Amino acid sequence: MRRKEREVTDYNLMLGIVDKCDCLRLGFVDGEDVYIVPLNYGYEDNDGNLILYCHGAKEGKKADLIKSNGRASFEMDTKHELVGSDTACSYSYMYQSVIGKGSIEFVESYDEKKHALELIMAHYTEGKEWHFNENMVDSVAVMKLCVKKWTAKEH
């Protein structure tokens, strides 16, 4: 990271940024190109390891890339604020962001899929317990990104 003074290294503060974000952008290698897709997500801390969950269709480009490669990068950001000035080059922008990479796979177990969907709902809603129809859980693809390396930054 070039701007070390903006790096966030405390794990709990990093998780706090993840919690405040509302969009996960997954990036995949697609031949000589890159494919990026924005998604809703849920997360959990597994003994100091970040796990991200998202859901989508069982078929399509994202599913094909997960099956063929099993790796993904991600980005999320929050706390956006434009800081004005009298000159264009003196403008600045406040933010918090997280980027990282890891291994990604489809969740096959019904119980883990349900757990992941509960985490996704918990991330966007407050204090409500959700129940899921078994057919709906079976029909959706749930992806699990085990984060191997990540950094956080704020300005």
Image (spheres, rainbow, N blue to C red):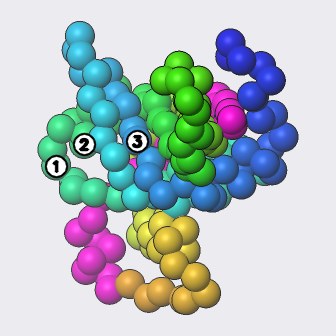
Let me know if residue 102 appears in the view: no
Q: Are the residues flagged by discs 2 and 3 in contact, CB closer than 8 Å?
A: no
Distance between mark 2 and mark 1 Cα atoms:
5 Å
Between residue 75 and residue 103, name the one nearer to us.
75
Say whether residue 89 is magenta. Answer: no
- Considering every residue shown, the one lying at the far front of the view is 86
Residue 55, horizontal then vertical, whole percent: 35, 58
Residue 92, horizontal then vertical, whole percent: 58, 31
Tell me which corner region of the image, top left, top right, bottom left or bottom right, holds residue 95: top right
Residue 116, horizontal then vertical, whole percent: 49, 65
Question: Residue at label 1?
Answer: 59
Tell me which corner region of the image, top left, top right, bottom left or bottom right, holds residue 132: bottom left
Quadrant occupied by the C terminus: top right
Q: Amino acid at mark 3?
A: Arg
Distance between mark 3 and mark 1 Cα atoms:
18 Å
Q: Badge 1: how crowded within 10 Å, few (<14), some, or many (20+)?
A: few
Label 2: which secondary element: helix
Q: Which of the labelled discs sits on residue 63, or is there none?
A: 2
Q: Amino acid at mark 1?
A: Glu
Q: Are the residues flagged by discs 2 and 1 in contact, CB closer than 8 Å?
A: yes
Residue 89, horizontal then vertical, whole percent: 53, 19
Residue shown at 36% from the left, 52% from the top: 39
Quadrant occupied by the N terminus: top right
Against 23, residue 110 (above or below) is below
Chief SS of the magenta region: strand
Q: Horizontally, is 48 left or right of 32 in the view? A: right
Q: Which of the labelled discs sits on residue 25, or is there none?
A: 3
Give the magenta range: 133-155
Residue shown at 28% from the left, 71% from the top: 138
